[in-house]
Amino acid sequence: MGRIVRLMVDHATVVVSGTKIADEIGTSRSEVWRLIQQLRGLGVDVAGHPATGYQLRAVPDLLLPEIVAPMVKGTIFAKNLHHYYKIGSTNTEAMQAAADGAPEGSVFLAEEQLAGRGRGANKWHSARSAGIYCSVVLRPAMPPSEALIFSLAAGLAVQSAVAGIFPGLRLDLKWPNDVLLSGRKFCGILTEMNSEATRVRYLVVGVGINVNQAKFPAELREIATSLKGETGTEWSRVELCSALLKSLDREYRLLVEDSAARDSILRRFEENSSSARGRRVRVEENGGVEGVTEGLDPRGFLQVRTGEGLRVVVSGTVKLE
């Protein structure tokens, strides 16, 4: 289907015959008709029929490699993009592919997730073609103790991508892996790792962004939002996904090439987080920790000043008070 869309995009001003499409992608006219029907079922506006040929009325907002790859040319993510109309979890797929030798920079995109995952046992609501569900494979030459920095860098990449499209929108980073708008979550980041004692074999950084969702399940309505819900504007997922991958590429290259990048990430995360310093929080970890945040330590872990002294939060859910 992606090849059909790319062909019609390249011939946007003319009607493309079913025979030409069939010849170009190496299939039959009847199979072209079947694929066109599937595209229409996904909301792609295709005019015409087998007797006259087909024409796109508008470029579809589907995260197809044929559309995204040219927009991220020059990044480590341009050559190995994988797209699924429906999948269990992009992170699960990416972790398995990485274990099987998928190259660094492999990207896994989905229109819909049936088992989208957040941290711990949390699920990620993944409405069809309304959000960005994206996981990337990285193979940094770093010890596993430094893995948290990738989640923080991904949050900064999301912020940069969104700000580049809608300047002035106030995004708030919440340690370690949430991005908020108006106090509600619109983006979650899930970083998973396979490592030896002293080195990372591979990392998968998953990013879920609520883009054009108009409604959420009852249990999420008070805590979740979307970019469309906050701005009143329909967003191009293709544009945002491309901006996200370019931002991720920039943050990752700096991190592996510049020894000062780690300090920059920690500083920028604190500057763009209303809760990293001076905010009263409760951390649901080891019976619960309550106190006031005092920034990040050199590894990126959250520091909380409690009645018993300074605690370093290695993991846990942070509740803002």
Image (cartoon, helix red, strand yellow):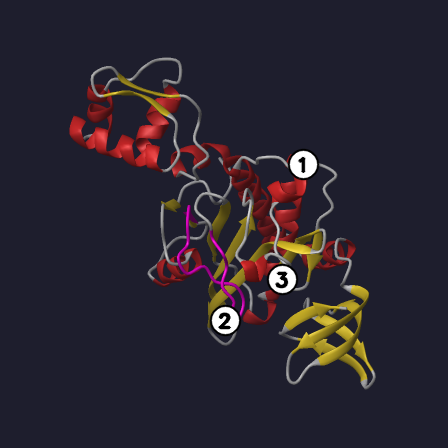
Task: Locate residue 192, reporting x and y percent.
Answer: 49, 65
Q: Is residue 252 magenta?
A: no
Task: Tell me: 224 left or right of 305.
Answer: left
Q: Earlier in the sequence, mark 2 or mark 3?
A: 2
Q: Foreground: 175 or 249?
A: 175
Q: Is residue 114 magenta?
A: yes
- Location of mark 3 (residue): 149
Q: Nearer the viewer, mark 1 or mark 3?
A: 1
The amino acid on which the numbered mark 1 sits, given as a three-letter code, is Phe
Q: Which residue is at a point 43% across and 31% down the rendered structure image?
A: 60
Answer whether residue 230 is visible to the viewer in this image. yes
Label 2, label 1: how far apart the Cα atoms are: 32 Å
Which element type, helix, strand or loop, lies under badge 1? loop
Q: Is residue 94 above or below residue 1?
A: below
Task: Tell me: 7 left or right of 154.
Answer: left
Task: Locate residue 103, reporting x and y percent.
Answer: 40, 53
Q: Is residue 214 above or below residue 236?
A: below
Q: Quadrant of residue 160?
A: top right
Label 1, label 3: how far apart the Cα atoms are: 26 Å
Say the numbered circle drawn on residue 166: 1
Task: Tell me: 56 left or right of 292.
Answer: left
Q: Which residue is at a point 52% across and 57% down the rendered structure image?
A: 217
- Location of mark 2 (residue): 121
Label 2, label 3: how far apart the Cα atoms are: 22 Å
Q: From the image, which quarter does the N terminus lie in?
A: top left
Q: Main secondary structure of the magenta part?
A: loop
* Count of number-bearing discs: 3
